[in-house]
Image: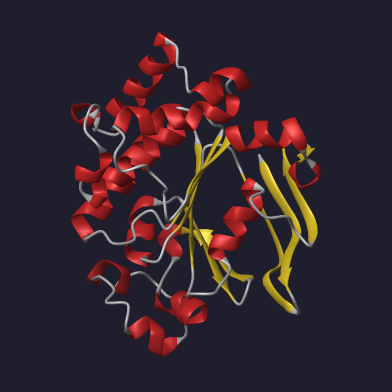
Amino acid sequence: MLIIDDLTRRFGPEAAVDRVSLAVPAGQVVGVIGPTGAGKSTLLRLINRLIDPSAGRILCDEVDVAKLNGRALRAWRSECAMIAAQFTLVGQLSATTNVLAGLLAVMPQWRSKAQIFTPRERGLALQALARVGMDHAARQPVAVLSQAGQRRVAIARALAQRPKLLLADDPLVGLDRPQATGVMAALRGINRQDGMTVICALSDPDVAMAACDRIIGMRDGRIVFDGAAATLGRKQLCNIYGGVAVDSLHLSEKLDLVSAA
């Protein structure tokens, strides 16, 4: 269970995340949606402790993640894997080598510096690539892969860490609808097979509704909607995005038919 309690992050006088509280049971797939600047990415970065909170708590299995530092913080970042919007793959290196890079933080320092990997670790990398349908590209430089392929490699890199919690910050940016659906299907498959908790910041509410169990809607750093994906309708989206913004989202007929009650 992940519990976020009164979490706040300020940049100067502005609160990017403003007194957010929520509980995420293990095994849920949660989509965090909202307009640009709503605080979606900041919330994920706080959970992973890439940035520190100004106030509040982040509890996982009764451990206050907000207080971790040193080796304990590195261990948390391994258990809570992050797929960033700019996923920092090294283009000239193979998909396998990029996946192995996800293990560097949990390896002995001397092996990490020399980038020496065991046969078992290489096996884990190949297994992770296979799980996202990219084992055929194991030896290819990631620079030659499509954007969707590169995102799958980034997911495999996170999987190689064997995390409890997988965070994905806008993993669909730059993808067309079929590619986006495929990437979300890969994340959903991982959730179903491993029971892994997945939290995604998503810009497309259609995809979020189709792929996630639960939707968190954010606006101005606050949660303005928290409910089952099936309950997300136009009324709720207007509260998250504003009426004019919702009209520009090109929502599917499926979403238009969801009850606004």
Q: Which quadrant of the figure contains the N terminus?
A: top right
| Residue 149 sits above or below residue 210 on the image | above
- 115 vs 206, nearest the viewer: 115
Report the residue at 77% width, 47% height from top: 66
Report the residue at 63% width, 72% height from top: 221
| Residue 219 sits above or below residue 91 on the image | below
Q: Quadrant location of residue 174? A: bottom left
| Residue 168 sits above or below residue 203 on the image | above
**x, y percent for residue 50:** 63, 50
Q: Can residue 146 be seen in this view?
A: yes
Q: Quadrant location of residue 25? A: top right
In-image side of 188 versus 24 (left or right): left
Which of the colour schemes (rainbow, by chain, secondary structure, one colour) is used? Answer: secondary structure
Q: Is residue 261 visible?
A: no
In-image side of 153 versus 5 (left or right): left
- 77 vs 165, nearest the viewer: 77
Q: Quadrant location of residue 249? A: bottom left
Report the residue at 25% width, 51% height from top: 147
Report the residue at 21% width, 61% height from top: 176
In-image side of 150 versus 158 (left or right): left
Q: Which residue lies furthest to the bottom in this view?
A: 244
Q: Residue furthest top?
A: 119
